[in-house]
Image (spheres, helix red, strand yellow):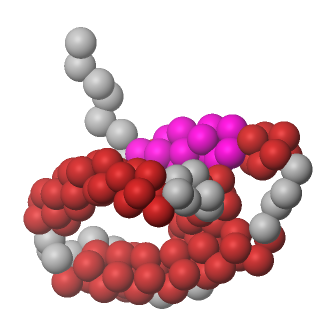
């Protein structure tokens, strides 16, 4: 079975949509838990937007598309490999899952801010992929 060639915009939308499902689940779990740390959610959102946005825009401007894709795979692999480390440290310190929901929701909000800023504020010349 072959998959259709999707535009980068559609792929980004699908990725954000699927991540949104996890965020909805996290929000429901927070509501069930009863205590929501809005300050922590905002902090995760701001830090994500400030770190991810400029790095992504600079990489898009300076690194060719094929190389960015390979770097993306490498970074995704590192992120997946870091999950057991983070859970292990959380188990040792007794803080496993302490900020999971707040971090997930805040990071998602930060990613949405980056995408919206890119689509509305960032100049067209910075949005075009490097050649």
Q: Residue at x 82, y 60 (%)?
A: 36
**24 drawn magenta:** yes
Viewer-proximal residue among 125 and 3? 3
**127 drawn magenta:** no
Which quadrant does the C terminus fall into?
bottom left
Q: Which residues are magenta?
A: 11-26
Q: Position of residue 97 (x, y in %)?
A: 57, 52
Which quadrant does the N terminus fall into?
top left
Residue 71: in sight, yes or no?
yes
Q: Position of residue 49 (x, y in %)?
A: 54, 78
Q: Residue at x 41, y 57 (%)?
A: 92
Q: Residue at x 70, y 73 (%)?
A: 40
- Answer with left or right where residue 93 lies relative to residue 39: left
Q: Position of residue 56 (x, y in %)?
A: 36, 76
Viewer-proximal residue among 78 and 114? 78
Above or below, 81 against 38 in this view is above
Q: Which quarter of the picture shows residue 121?
A: bottom right
- Answer with left or right where residue 119 lies relative to residue 52: right
Residue 112: in sight, yes or no?
no
Q: Residue at x 44, y 82 (%)?
A: 51
Main secondary-structure element of the magenta-colored stretch = helix
- Answer with left or right where residue 131 lies relative to residue 87: left
Count of residue discs:
0
Above or below, 1 against 101 in this view is above
Q: Position of residue 17 (x, y in %)?
A: 58, 43
Viewer-proximal residue among 37 and 44? 37
């Amino acid at each position: 079975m072959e998959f259709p060639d999707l535009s980068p915009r559609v792929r980004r939308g699908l990725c954000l949509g699927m991540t949104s499902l996890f965020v909805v689940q996290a929000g429901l779990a927070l509501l069930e838990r009863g205590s929501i740390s809005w300050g922590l959610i905002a902090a995760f959102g701001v830090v994500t937007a400030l770190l991810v946005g400029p790095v992504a825009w600079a990489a898009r401007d300076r690194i060719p598309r094929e190389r960015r894709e390979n770097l993306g795979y490498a970074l995704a692999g590192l992120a997946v490999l870091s999950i057991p480390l983070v859970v292990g440290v959380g188990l040792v310190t007794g803080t496993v899952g302490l900020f999971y929901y707040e971090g997930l929701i805040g990071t998602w909000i930060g990613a949405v801010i980056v995408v919206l800023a890119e689509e509305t504020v960032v100049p067209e010349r910075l949005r075009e992929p490097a050649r």
